[in-house]
Amino acid sequence: MAPGEVLDTAALIEWPVERIVGKMVLEAQREEVYRVAPDRLVLLDAVEVNWASPRDASIEAARKLAMLTGDIAGLSSIDLKLLALAKERGATLFTDDYRLQNLCSRAEIPWASVITEGINSIWSWEVRCTGCGIGHEIPSQTSASKGDIGDCDICGSPLRVKRRK
């Protein structure tokens, strides 16, 4: 059996329905599609897609990789599951999310863009205090809204994820 294709939500919304048939998607993406394009969900329910879920061990491996690279601060639980599913199934991940593309490149998971150009280099991230500039460990949460990942335990200023130089 040939490797499959895993689609992020951008593909579910942007691609013609015929291109989505037979591709792997997560059940959790239903809510995302409904929130952004409720009419599109009706179309998706009318075609055959492969509603799949990665194993817990695969999700944990994806989380560890994202922690290692620093990409974890910008990922949702759905992002981690998409990455885990692509790795587990030896599939290509179609995504416009630069952090997912970065992780795929690191883990040698094939990826392709949905409608954007995609990344052209691999980045690493670090957490720095905006006040004292001290580096901190990357938090273990799976997402952070607008880069807010907490406050410095030394000076109390906000922590931010920055590209490692």
Image (cartoon, rainbow, N blue to C red):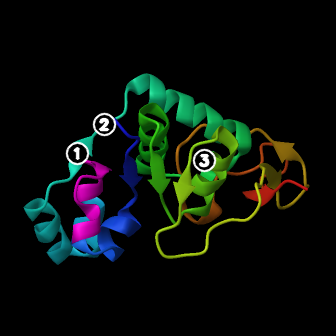
* Vertical arrangement, residue 112 with respect to residue 115, above or below: above
Residue 51 - label? 1
Contact (Cβ within 8 Å) of mark 2 with mark 1 = yes
Residue 104 - label? 3
**Type of the residue with mark 3:** Cys
Question: Quick check: 55 left or right of 147?
Answer: left
**Type of the residue with mark 1:** Trp
Where residue 17 sits, quadrant-wise, is bottom left
- Residue corresponding to mark 2: 53
The answer to whether any part of residue 144 appears in the image is: no
Dot placed on the residue nearer the N-terminal end, 2 or 3? 2
Where residue 56 sits, quadrant-wise, is top left
Horizontal and vertical percent position of residue 57: 45, 23
Dot placed on the residue nearer the N-terminal end, 3 or 1? 1
Residue visible at 54% across and 63% down? 97
Where residue 148 sits, quadrant-wise, is bottom right
Q: Is residue 19 magenta?
A: yes
**Type of the residue with mark 2:** Ser
Horizontal and vertical percent position of residue 94: 46, 59
